Image: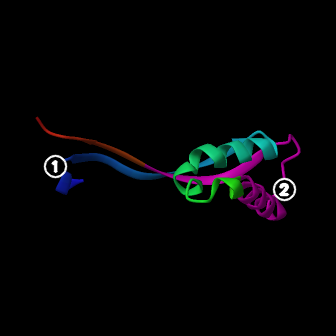
Amino acid sequence: MEQAGLVPHRVELVERDMTLPGREGMKAWIRTTWLPFTERIPESERDIFVDELTSEYFAGAPLSEDGLVHMDMVRLMVEAEKPA
């Protein structure tokens, strides 16, 4: 940030429990949030990739009793400004 001329005010890792509405919710999240990565996969194979990735995840972490997917997430939160 300093090389870009920014002054950092806050840089922290924030842990949270992300919940998604079941298997289809997780697939939709992968299709959107992971787009910079999944767009590198040939379009004809993307749905197969998303299906397999979702199946692998659920093999080790099944849905909760209320039908939700719970994932431990860590986000990098950054606040900075460029001085005038």
Q: Position of residue 17 (x, y in %)?
A: 65, 47
Residue at left offset 59%, top offset 48%: 16
Which residue is the site of mark 1?
Answer: 5
What's the distance in space between the residues labelled 2 and 1, CA to CA? 46 Å
Residue at left offset 73%, top offset 52%: 47
Q: Where is residue 20 in the image (x, y as percent from the top left)?
A: 72, 42
Q: Position of residue 7 (x, y in %)?
A: 20, 47
**Is 26 drawn above or below residue 56 in the view shown?**
above
Horizontal arrangement in the rendering, residue 60 relative to residue 9 (left or right): right
Q: Which amino acid does label 2 sit on?
A: Pro
Residue at left offset 18%, top offset 57%: 3
**Element under disc 1:** loop
Q: Can residue 53 be seen in this view?
A: yes
Q: Quadrant of residue 45 in the image?
A: bottom right
Give the tally of numbered discs.
Answer: 2
Does the stretch in magenta take in 20? no
Does the stretch in magenta take in 61? yes
**Element under disc 2:** loop
Q: Is residue 15 visible?
A: no
Query: Would you call the spot at circle 1 few (<14 residues within 10 Å), some (14-19), or many (20 or more)?
Result: few
Q: What is the span of residues highlighted in magenta in the rendered image? A: 47-76
Which residue is the site of mark 2?
Answer: 62
Q: Quadrant of residue 37 in the image?
A: bottom right
Between 38 and 65, which is closer to the camera in this rendering? 38
Q: Residue pushed farthest right?
A: 65
> On the rendered image, what quadrant is the C terminus found in?
top left
